[in-house]
Image (cartoon, grey):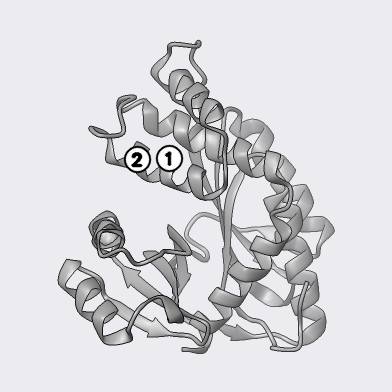
Amino acid sequence: MAGHSHWSKIKRAKGANDAKRGKIWSKIARKIIIAAKGGGDPRDNLSLRYVIDEAKAANMPKDTIEKAIKKGTGELGAENYEPVTYEAYAPGGVAMMIEGLTNNPARTAPDLRSILEKAGGNLAARGAVSFQFTKQGIITIKVEAVDEDRLLELALDAGADDVRNVGEVFEVITPPTSFGKVKDTISAANISIEAAEVTQMPNNTVNVDADIAQRLLRLIDALEDHDDVQSVSHNAEIPESVSV
């Protein structure tokens, strides 16, 4: 439970730092471009529909969304991005998974290596830390938005693995393959969703002191500020007293 409480706290802290709205929109636009390669109509392309939902949640303008779709379908000239995943160690031996979208991997890797090394971390070899994480869907819902028993029934029937009460929110955990169905089932029940994504969840967490935690959070900010980085996951247990 502690690791998941930590996750929800990190997501709230991250949200507070997402005032850089233009950069957030740019990152989501890349996801739209990739998703739209499978077709520009969200009614026929579930991946695109889910990214558009994310864009709307971030208050991304409609014309910006439409432009990204057209870039993905080739109507506005092709823009090619590819998914990349980097494994790394942060200060204190904290394991990290960094996921991104880039049009130039030869640029991205050295950039991230530099950011990590300046913070006392380093890029790791492929497979060095990935075994410590599991790809899962996580859907966050405020506790006042729904009765826990009702949410549990809806989510599990739709294919979720678990529903956890972590204080201010419920976290619905799903396999990646069931993420869309569970999300749609919850939305169809008129339950407001705070956040929803498929991400790397740590299998176990490690305790770090306040100094390491502060350095880790500054490193996460620096990594997430890079245009090519979409998400950063780690396995550190952040002390309650630490904030960004």
Name the residue type under label 2.
Answer: Arg
Mark 2, secondary structure of its residue: helix
Classed neighbour count for the residue bearing mark 2: other residues with Cα under 10 Å, few (<14), some (14–19), many (≥20)? some
Quarter of the image for residue 15 reads bottom right
Q: Nearer the viewer, residue 93 or 16?
A: 16
Relative depth, front residue between 137 and 233: 137
Query: Is residue 15 left or right of 222 when viewed as pictured?
Result: left
Tell me: 186 left or right of 51: left
Residue 236, given in percent of the width and then of the height, sits at 62, 78
Q: Which residue is mark 1?
A: 52
Around disc 1, counting alpha carbons within 10 Å, would you say few (fewer than 14), some (14 to 19), or many (20 or more)? many
Q: CA distance from mark 1 to mark 2?
A: 5 Å
Q: Three-letter amino acid code at disc 1?
A: Ile
- Whether residue 135 is visible to the viewer of this picture, yes or no, is no
Q: Is 144 placed above or below 44 here?
A: below
Asked which quadrant contains residue 240, the reply is bottom right
Q: Tell whether 159 sits left or right of 124.
A: left
Quarter of the picture containing the C terminus is bottom right
Q: Are marks 1 and 2 in contact (CB under 8 Å)?
A: yes
Q: Nearer the viewer, residue 126 or 2?
A: 2
Q: Which residue is painted at 38% across and 34% down in the image? A: 35
Q: In the rendered view, would you say 57 is above or below 13? A: above
- Residue 158 on image: x %, y %: 18, 66
Q: Residue at x 67, y 75 (%)?
A: 93
- Does dot 1 land on a helix, a strand or a loop? helix
Q: Which residue is mark 2?
A: 49
Q: Depth check: 156 or 233 in front?
A: 156
Q: Confirm whether residue 215 shows in the render.
A: yes
The residue drawn where x is 50% and y is 11% is 76
Q: Position of residue 169 (x, y in %)?
A: 48, 79
